């Protein structure tokens, strides 16, 4: 073991693989327990460490069955050696995609001339912690049971976010900002009719393609359209002033835009700015200086998400887990091998063909139907 502790290989498991591995290890079936043990021995023999994030823990814990969640936590707690994205070098608690983004933004801010590959190398320093399962979860893994409601709420919100971001009921996503700003703004009865039609269309889309676990599509649609109405009421004026006000809420100023970019592209920039604001809050970085130094094209996780999302195949049901899958995809530049599901693997392959710089910053991205297939795949690389 000592010979490879200096250079372990980090294996980012898909959440389903982690669940299967735990299930087999706790199974009454001798054959399934043997499969889990064989995988563990392969990890140890080959110096491979599962690389986890807070998103893995969230998916393992977001269940009503407290006993099953406790078993999963105890399994992780027993691990002799494991790796995770670390929030703090001095007391390494587990982090997620925001931790990765924070490291990347810090690196880009300190080295504003660095390209995306250099930002990656700088951000990777100290980002991954290695220790026992107890180091990861703390002395008592059952303390994490208190977070079950929090994780459940996060997963519920993920289902809503996927439903909201995969619809274009307003019908403007492909318009250029120039065309949108020069359009006429509806008012009075015409506006109310349009909003009612949008709300009805939104309800139908959620029912047809949204996550089946969304409790009430009507309420979700009503809340969304109520926010649209409120924003419109708070920002009277022409279409241009309304568009600029909406972008300003996300930190986008006119100087950040070019009028031939689409609404989708502007919103993507807004999401990026919002995330950068979140991870730099309280760190003494002036916003205008941040925007000068930190570019979306030089942030590895932003490049991965932006490129891969374009090629995700559509599905009959858009599940909330898609958001978590996208977050876990940001491990590809940091893990030696990242395992993803079939849809994500397809998207990565297409994105690699389209953008060679993405392939240069990512390590191996593979898919496996079961964790049992991982040793053969990794050994063949």
Image (cartoon, rainbow, N blue to C red):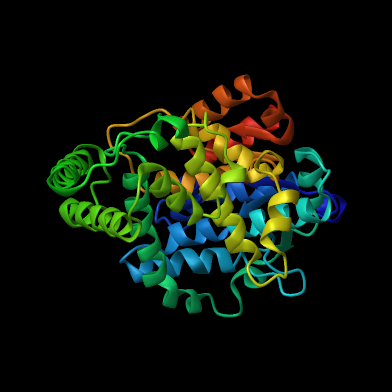
Q: Residue 232, position in %: x, y?
A: 30, 54
Q: Percent x, y for residue 341? A: 48, 36
Camera-side residue: 259 or 318? 259
Q: How many marks?
A: 0
65 displayed left or right of 346? left
| In front of the other: 217 or 359 | 217
Q: Give the residue drawn at x 65%, y 24%.
A: 355
Residue 20 appears in the picture as rendered: no
Q: Position of residue 225 (x, y in %)?
A: 24, 52
Please state, as top left, top right, bottom left or bottom right, where the N terminus lies in the image: bottom right
Tell me: 51 left or right of 165.
Answer: right
Above or below for 52 versus 144: above
Quarter of the figure that contains the C terminus: top right
Query: On the picture, is 21 further left or further right than 41?
Result: left
Q: Measuring 72% from the left and 41% from the top, which residue is drawn there?
A: 298
Location of residue 175 by image quarter: top left
Position of residue 75 measured from the top left corner of the image (x, y, whole percent):
53, 64
- The part of the image, by quadrant, that contains residue 153 is bottom left
The foreground one among 219 and 142 is: 219
Instruction: Give the residue drawn at x 73%, y 57%.
Output: 289
Residue with the most extreme top position: 353
The residue that appears at 36% across and 58% down in the rendered structure is: 157
Instruction: Determine if residue 182 is in view.
Output: yes
């Amino acid at each position: 073991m000592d010979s490879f502790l200096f250079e372990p290989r980090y294996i980012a498991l898909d959440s389903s693989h982690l669940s299967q591995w735990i299930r087999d290890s706790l199974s009454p079936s001798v054959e399934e327990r043997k499969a889990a043990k064989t995988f563990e021995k392969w990890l140890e023999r080959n110096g491979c460490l599962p690389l986890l994030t807070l998103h893995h823990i969230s998916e393992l814990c977001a269940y009503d069955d407290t006993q099953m969640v406790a078993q999963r936590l105890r399994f992780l707690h027993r691990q002799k050696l494991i790796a995770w994205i670390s929030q703090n070098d001095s007391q390494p608690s587990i982090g997620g995609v925001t931790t990765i983004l924070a490291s990347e933004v810090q690196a880009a801010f300190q080295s504003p001339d660095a390209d995306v590959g250099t930002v990656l190398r700088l951000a990777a320093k100290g980002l991954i912690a290695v220790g026992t399962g107890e180091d990861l979860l703390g002395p008592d893994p059952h303390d994490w049971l208190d977070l079950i409601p929090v994780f459940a709420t996060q997963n519920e919100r993920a289902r809503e976010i996927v439903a909201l971001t995969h619809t274009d009921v307003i019908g403007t996503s492909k318009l250029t900002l120039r065309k949108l700003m020069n359009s006429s703004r509806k008012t009075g009865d015409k506006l109310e009719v349009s909003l009612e039609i949008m709300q009805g269309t939104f309800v139908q889309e959620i029912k047809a393609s949204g996550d089946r676990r969304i409790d009430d599509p009507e309420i979700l649609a009503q809340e969304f359209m109520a926010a649209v109405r409120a924003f419109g009421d708070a920002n009277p004026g022409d279409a241009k002033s309304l568009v600029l006000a909406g972008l300003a809420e996300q930190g986008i100023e006119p100087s950040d835009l070019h009028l031939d970019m689409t609404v989708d592209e502007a919103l993507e920039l807004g999401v990026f700015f919002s995330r950068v604001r979140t991870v730099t809050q309280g760190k003494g970085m002036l916003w205008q200086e941040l925007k000068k130094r930190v570019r979306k094209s030089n942030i590895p996780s932003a490049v991965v998400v932006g490129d891969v999302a374009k090629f995700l195949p559509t599905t009959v049901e858009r599940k909330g887990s898609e958001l978590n899958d996208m977050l876990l995809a940001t491990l590809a530049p940091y893990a030696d091998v990242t395992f993803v599901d079939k849809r994500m693997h397809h998207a990565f392959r297409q994105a690699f063909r389209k953008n060679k710089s993405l392939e240069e910053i990512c390590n191996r991205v593979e898919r496996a139907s079961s964790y049992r297939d991982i040793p053969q795949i990794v050994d063949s690389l």
